[in-house]
Image: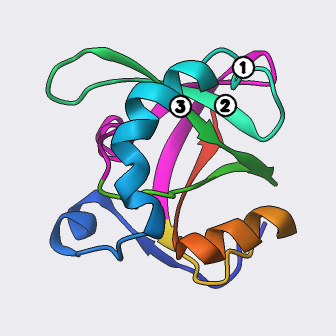
Amino acid sequence: MSMGKQTVTDQRNLEHQIPPRTRLAFVRPFALYVINPIARLFAGWVPGFGILKYLGRKSGRRYRTPVNVFKRGDHFVFALTYGSRVDWVKNVLAAGGCEMRHCGRDIRLFRPEVFVDPKQRLMPAIVRMVLRLNKTTEFLRMRRA
């Protein structure tokens, strides 16, 4: 399935690029300590959400991060609302995948790819509007194992 014309980068390339700062970047500390603990209560069960489960690349600690996720063909696509340099993205890239709780099911994901799409073509229309306001142009896609 064609995923549209997009620029694919790998982890090595991300280390040398300075991704654009999204407008929501300043909210990230609040989200980590307030919003995420609440979202973990429902994100694994509600369509459009998921909980990524992965290990820290340095600490080996287990993490559970709530995310927005949309199935597109054989892929799951995640909007990187805080950019690609956040720890969860680095951890998933370093591991080559992760697990996700989505709609009440556990799914193994692999082949993570970060790509840039300024038009947010793989997102639903209502989500696209919010992402444009936030200046989100980076996305992560993974395949189901």
Instruction: Find disc 1 in the rendering and name its residue.
Output: 42
| Kind of residue at disc 3 | Ile
Q: Is residue 6 above or below residue 9?
A: below
| Kind of residue at disc 1 | Phe
Q: Are marks 3 and 1 in contact (CB under 8 Å)?
A: no
Q: In this image, 139 relative to 3: left or right?
A: left
Instruction: Find disc 2 in the rendering and name its residue.
Output: 50
Instruction: Find disc 3 in the rendering and name its residue.
Output: 35
Answer few, some or many: residues within 10 Å of disc 1's Cα (few below 14, many 20 plus, some between 14 and 19): some
| Kind of residue at disc 2 | Gly
Q: What's the distance in space between the residues labelled 3 and 1, CA to CA?
A: 12 Å
Q: Quadrant of residue 19?
A: bottom left
Front position in the image: 89 or 43: 43
Between label 1 and label 2, give the one nearer the viewer. 1
Q: Position of residue 73 (x, y in %)?
A: 81, 54
Q: What's the distance in space between the residues labelled 3 and 2, CA to CA?
A: 14 Å
Q: Position of residue 115 (x, y in %)?
A: 49, 69
Q: Earlier in the sequence, mark 3 or mark 2?
A: 3
Quick one: quadrant of the C terminus? top right
Quick one: quadrant of the N terminus? bottom right
Q: Is residue 122 above or below residue 103?
A: below
